Amino acid sequence: MFVINCPYCGQREQSEFKAGGEAHIVRPKQPTELSDDQWAEYLFMRKNIKGIQFERWVHSHGCRKWFNMVRDTSNDEIKAIYKMGEKPPVK
Amino acid sequence: MTNNLRVKSSKFIDETYKISFKFNNKNYYGYKGDTLASALLANGIHLIGRSFKYHRPRGIMTAGSEEPNAIVQIHKNTSRTEPNVRATEIEIYEGLEASSQNCWPSVNFDIGGINNFLSPVLPAGFYYKTFMWPASFWKKYEYFIRKSAGLGKSPTEPDPDIYEHKYIHCDVLIIGAGISGIIAAKTSAKNGFKTLLLDEKPYLGGSTIYQNSEHFKINNQISSSWIEKEINEIKKIDNLEIKTRTSVAAFHSYNFLLARENLTDHLPLHQRDGKVRHRLLKIRAKKVISATGSLERPLVFDNNDRPGILLSSAIEKYSNLFGVACGQKNVLFTNNDSAYETAISLFQKGINIEAIIDNRENVDSKLVKEIEKNNIKIYKGYTVVNTFGYKRINKISIMQLSKDGQKVVGSKISIDCDCLGMSGGWTPAVHLFTQSGGKLKFRDDDQVFIPDTYPSDQISIGSCNGEFTLDEILSSISKKLKDFLNIKKTEYENLEILSHFNKTKRNIWLLPSDKIIGKTKPFVDYQNDATAKDIKLALREGFRSIEHVKRYTTTGMGTDQGKLGNMHALGIISETAGSKMGELGTTTFRPPYTPLTFGTIVGRNVGEYFDVSRKTPIHDWHVENKAKFENVGQWKRAWFYPKENEGMHEAVQRESKAARDSAGILDASTLGKIDIQGTDASEFLNRVYTNAWSKLAIGKCRYGLMLNEDGMVYDDGVTTRLDENHYIMTTTTGGAATVLSKLEDYLQTEWPELDVYLTSVTDHYATISVCGPNSKKIISKVIPNLDLSDEKFPHMSFKNTKIDKVKCRVMRISFTGEQSYEINVQANYGKSVWDKCMQAGKEFNITPYGTETMHLLRAEKGFIIVGQDTDATMTPIDLQMDWIVSKKKYDFIGKRSLYRSDTIRDDRKQLIGLVTENPKEVLEEGAQIVLDANKSPVEMLGHVTSSYYSPNLEKSIALGVVKGGKNMMGQKLIIPMENKQINVTVTDPVFLDKENKRLNA
Ligand SMILES: [Zn+2]
């Protein structure tokens, strides 16, 4: 169980949050222009990395705000947390 | 033999306080301070139970939580019964009743013991190999296996005890109150850290507290006296909390730990009522110090499992702490100096030692010399090759080890004994450390795994870190604590330490025998009856990974998780396969460290507190009117209202008929309600629903279907435009929370530029739906000022109005196909408005109906229920709801997916209506639908999703999904049931009032 530093509320228990999958996948602006393959790429394809992963999280039992997290999936170390729309602070 | 095995009194045992208890229905006495194990040993009892597979007699092996054999059932056939209780941990109390497990009919005569003689046919993987084929035979085998195997019986009555959970936050948590833990706790607390010290035992001080030897001194005091003073001091420190009888079960990442505090298990039953039995502590610590100690290793040789064979350190503990001699003719068998510590303690207490068998050839430490001085025979360079005695050891035979330790040489010597203590060195208790994600390294010198890298702010100190001697521990502990706690000095910098322990050890994982291995039983895992032979067999059959060998041989898979034997299993694998121990790794240690009861895990969440339940403001009325309830998510919804002698079917038929003939009333308060405001609210709805919203006039309502991005139907409901930039959306009862979070997700992450605010108002409003041909008359009585004419208040529109002085919103919308009005009023007024409607409707026989009738009525109209007629694989097109999918809108969630190659297939499952050939026959929901039941294999075309007997149509109706169903109108299909086939015909899903005449009737 991690302790997550919500950018709006501060340090809280992981049980207050929900994970929302890979971050920085932008919904296509013009889905109708896409081929089946291109749409499927957006719809289904997700990374599942052992190591540094960029993820979306939401403080579902708190401020209900979404934010991004950089997490090392091999040891659950949280490398960075930043708000939606902000650039990732680490590569 | 009664109580003649008590030796010189121990200060930990109160001999003035006699306690009687029962073991296998016989009465015994012990004293306050005894465990069940020490009390039984004092009564001369070693035989506790039978082993799992071979039903071999087994006795007490240890004096702690690592015990594999001495597990008992307590308070059999009562509500407080508990299986697999370790006799070595349970403290005796007046009235304790314990009995042997895994034996039938009795521990002294056990039919399963025949397995022991059958053992050549019961090797590793036997169960997998034999009972899995042919599959149909499993049922027969299972009956016998279940009867003769298994560990204890689970209770069948409700647990009378209370359990609770507690959160604790601390600066420093110390696990284990042995010498290292005590020093760490005092140092931490004295430096101002909020400190918590936990130990699984009822006393503090670990094994040092009963260390009375002149060979181990601190500042010139015997170590037990020194630590006793330290303990007295720490008890006075304010910011140090000490919990005994508290075992840490799990060590998770980010220093989150679970511990079980045992509060009443040591009390007589009559003193437990009303008290909390176990408390599950959920601990978040800034820093963790593991001082969990180490476990003595057994030695692996032929027949090393007989009652009377114990760990050498356990024999020492029984004598020093409990004042009990485990035997009168004791032999110790060792590969290191530890057994000599035991020997010296026994000797001090006047307990007879016959001999010491030492694997080592050249040993001359101070401890060894003292034993020699006392004329106790030491066989140096020898090993035990066999043991004798069925229910209690009575003899061993020993032989000399070859130089390389691979063989035995010379002739056999027999030694009579009634107790054999073994010491194979020590294994650091790193279980919790590895649970936390810590990585181990292997130390070749003494063949132990010790902590290497720490994943969080924690350290391991003392013997769990591989520091086994007093001088090793005390010479390094001060610097470690200073570095870890970031403090300048400790009071333990210049201790004067005397320690005569010599660290030489001769490690042989599987001791050689004069017999071939196939003829021996050297046990590695006692609880699961896995032998070295089984491990070798697994390797011969090609298993290499330690995790695979573990599962194939079941080594380490008992309730003790192989705390004693896992290292030997690794050692034997490494030697046999020629791989290095360090590279082989260990198996994964999983929580809990020792088993937890279900009660502890569940805590207070039992009975009505098992889950949160949500009740509508009108709930009490439903209860008073004898409603039956159903759970919808966490909501308690009125299901139907049976009158005298009515079953569910009769009640639902009556309610359904009344709603169409005159008037029905439904509590719809559970529907999800989301208040949507902002200048982009209309645009937002355009993007999340499949139909168009921009042109919806203020005061109008519209039904909407929401998809996932994959095009599948996700939720539905009616949304009303209250004002230019203000909507109220309704969702399904079960979908309210997920819809809100999905909408928030899109707003915050995809469309942050939209000016839209979402607020859940589900609980703020009570919703009362009145439907039926007389609904208009009833509403006009409740709200006389409201113009209900079809011109002023048409279907799919809404009015702000008042009932007396109470503001309310009335929507004219319908889920039944009848003319109907939905009154939304602030929740507090829900009950009074409901009463008003009932009063006004009395002359029209207004009939309250529940969810079951609601489902029936909507099925007559062919309206879907998301989650019943859909299952996340249905598009709106599959549901024959093409009309609701806007062709004009450029985009909405899920639009692009509606013309993927998969979603445009003609043969997808599509929603259809079904009528049975026999109108009285009602289909089973979930039943399969086929075209030809005689063609093999039978092709499943789909299944029935909703099915009812319609009292209004006087026939059975059903909805279902069928491959290519859209183009099958009029097609005859078959529903094959267990002993009949039902003929059905595919129809339009709308069964009643296709023209929607009733909405305005
Ligand atoms: Zn927050």
Image (cartoon, coloured by chain):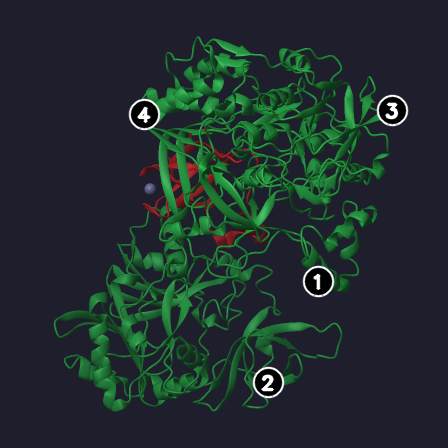
Earlier sequence position, callout 4 versus callout 3: 4
**Residue at image location 12% in from the left, 71% down from the top:** B805
Q: Chain of mark 3?
A: B
Residue position for label 2: B985
Earlier sequence position, callout 2 versus callout 1: 1
Q: Chain of mark 4?
A: B
**Where residue B4 sits: x, y (%)?**
59, 36
Q: Which residue is more in the foreground, B421 or B450?
A: B421
Question: Horizontal placement of B709 versus B66: left or right?
Answer: left
Q: What's under tag 3, amino acid-wise?
A: Ser
**Residue at image location 60% in from the left, 80% down from the top:** B968
Earlier sequence position, callout 2 versus callout 4: 4
Residue position for label 4: B237
Q: Nearer the viewer, mark 3 or mark 1?
A: 3
Mark 2 C-beta to ligand 1 under 8 Å: no
Q: Chain of mark 1?
A: B
Marks 4 and 3 on same chain: yes
Residue B919 figure quarter: bottom right
Marks 2 and 1 on same chain: yes
The chain displayed green equals: B
Label pair 2/3, CB-CB below 8 angstroms = no
Q: How many marks?
A: 4
The chain displayed red equals: A
Q: CA distance from mark 2 to mark 3?
A: 90 Å
